[in-house]
Each structure stands twice: as structure tokens, then as C-alpha cells.
Image (cartoon, grey):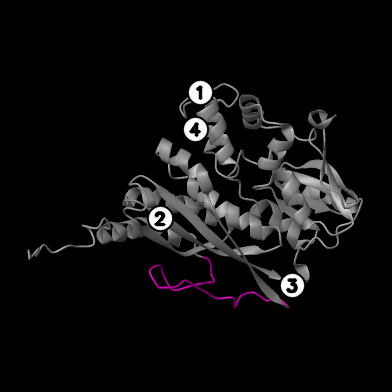
Amino acid sequence: MCSNKTSLTYRDAGVDIDAGNRAVELMKESVKRTYTPGVVGDLGGFGGLYSLAGHSMSDPMLVSGTDRVGTKLRLAIMMDKHDTIGQDCVAMSVNDILVQGATPLFFLDYIAVGKLDPVKVAGIVRGVAEACEESGCALLGGETAEMAGFYDNDDYDVAGFAVGIVDRPKLITGESIKAGDVILGLPSSGVHSNGFSLVRKIVFDHKQLSIDTEIPEFGKTLGEELLTPTRLYPKAVLPLIEQELVKGMVHITGGGFYENIPRVLPKGVTAEVDVTTWPRLPVFTKLQEWGNVAWPEMYRTFNMGIGMILIVDQNDVETVKENLGNRGEAVYEIGRIVSGDGPVVLKGAEFDA
């Protein structure tokens, strides 16, 4: 029998605790800048603490949402650019809880890596923190997991969840939506974080383009356009929610218009959307052209330039438009709520039989 007396360490197994500690030190200042009055304690505890003492509501409710960036991360890894992907992670959850009328309170992230690079992880977290600041919520905590042998050294995944608060009487459920209500659309910043499996299939497999390819219609490289972070909507929408001007909201994510709009509609009504009422971003025109993608598939997969939908009473339309316009926010009147239980109807030359 042979005896092997070599003393193994966690680092020998691929996990560097010192690198993890270094990453925490690098991200501390970014995280602290997000702290709001409700935050209790400091970074480094086993759990994040948040006090609700300052919220005077008749029936406060917490609203939570969770998501991940998805395969858009592959582009960030290919470009070795990691400082904006955190905004995608925050936006996917914060925008989701916003549609129910919730004011974001705090966010927690989860980053899993093959090999921990403290500077790279700190850059990712910096993007998360900046998005939290813009959304008015605290980055309350998170987890960085070094998973040697599970992920390749350069690979990583980013996920997180947001928690917000709303007074139950002001909860946005969509139940009061009726025929005659107006559908308003707030523009997206680009592809956001949905449909990237199809995007990658089109640009890399089908067209065999490089991320460094200059696309004249974009005024930038393909990679730069596709990595444009998901827009954050709290600043634009919360003032409208506070004035109770919104009957229903829809975050256009995976499933596009066809799958997401029905989620907020009560029985007996459906939506008619005129796709000619807002400017189509060049990225969607090129993706459709490059992949010869059917238009219904485009509107089922992508946001097509509209990232958030507001459904408002026809008597409040001008008030909402004026409110948004005074704050420099673009808004488009894109459709109507009509009687019926059928699927969402999209109108425009692309859909004319």
C-alpha cells in the first residue's frame, strides 16, 4: 500500500478564497453607494437586513421578482466587456415588479464563475450597483460562487432578485382594464435581454458575422449594439403610479407582444396594437433581414423597440403624455383595448394578408 501525504488545499481544487475576499473589497464602495435609509448593517453579513419602518401604508405588500441575464452573457464573454451586464440583471427583475405598482426596495445578485477574477467580478457588481442606484433600490447583498470544473475558466452566470413594496389598494392588477382604454408604449434601448439564442443563431451561425463587424445602420459594431443594456423603467413610471394614472402595465420580455400583453388583461377584452406607430430600431430590421424571420416570430420573440407598455383610461392619456414629456420621456400611443377574448392583434403592412 502506498501513502500519499501531499496536503491539498481548496485552492488546489480550483477555489481561491483570497481572490474572493479581494473581489469583496473591490466592490464595497459600489455597493455602499446604493444604500438607502432602510438598509440595516453593512456588507458581509450572512443575510441582508432591511427595515420597513419608514413606509406608512394601510396594507403594505412586498412584491418580488427574479431572473437572469441569459445567453446575452456569451457576447459579454466574447467581447471581454463586463461592466454593463449587471444592468441587464437588475432591469429584468426590477421592471417586472414595477408592473404591479411596486417601488423597488432592494436587490440581491448571484454570480457563478469558473475561475474568480476579482477585477472582472467587481466590474460586474459595479454595473449591478449603478443600475440599483438608478432604480432607487439598495444592493443589499449577494453571492459569488467559484465553481471550478463546472464552468470553464472564462465563463460565468449572473442572476438576481428584486423586492419592492406597494400599498394593497394601489396594487396594479389590470382588473379594471376595459374596452376603450389606450395602450401607450415606452421605447426600449435595444434588444434588452431576451431572444439572444435566436440573435446568436442569426448573426453567428447563419450570417457568420464577427462581434467586431461595423454595421452602418447601427453606427457601431455588432457587439456594441447587442450589448446595449436593458432599459430601467422605474424613474419613468413611478410618478405615474403614484398619481394612480396607470390601469395595467406590461414588461415586454420573452414572448414579446403575443405572450406578455394577455397576462395583464381581464376576461372579455383583448389588445389591438398598430406596429406603425413607433420607430422600429435598426437592430430589429437587420435581424429580421439577416435571418429571414417571419414578422409574427419577431414580435413573439423581441420587444421590437417597445420595452414597457402602459394601459390607461382614455381620459388620462393626455395627462400621462404630458407628465412623461415634461420629464423628457418619449411615449407612443400604440393601440387600444377592445372587446373580445381572442389573441392580441398586431396591425401593419407586415401583418396584412
Q: Which residue is denoted by mark 4 in the rendering?
A: 223
* Distance in Å between CA atoms under marks 2 and 4: 23 Å
* Above or below 303: residue 234: below
Mark 2 crowdedness (10 Å alpha carbons): few <14, some 14-19, many ≥20? many
The disc, 1 or 2, on the residue closer to the chain's N-terminal end is: 2
Q: Is mark 1 on a helix, strand or loop?
A: strand
In this rendering, which labeled residue sits more in front, label 2 or label 4? Answer: 2
- Disc 2 marks a residue whose amino acid type is Ala
User: Would residue 331 be counted in the magenta stretch?
Assistant: no
Q: Which residue is denoted by mark 1 in the rendering?
A: 214
Circles 3 and 4: CB distance less than 8 Å?
no
Image quadrant in which the N terminus is located? bottom left
Q: Is mark 4 on a helix, strand or loop?
A: helix
- Disc 1 marks a residue whose amino acid type is Glu
- Disc 3 marks a residue whose amino acid type is Arg
Q: Which mark is residue 112?
A: 2
Q: Is residue 298 left or right of residue 169?
A: left
The disc, 1 or 4, on the residue closer to the chain's N-terminal end is: 1
x and y, in percent, of residue 316 in the image:
86, 53
Region in magenta? 36-58
* Distance in Å between CA atoms under marks 1 and 2: 32 Å
* Distance in Å between CA atoms under marks 3 and 4: 43 Å
Circles 2 and 4: CB distance less than 8 Å?
no
* Distance in Å between CA atoms under marks 3 and 1: 50 Å
Front residue of 113/222: it is: 113
x and y, in percent, of residue 295 in the image:
73, 32
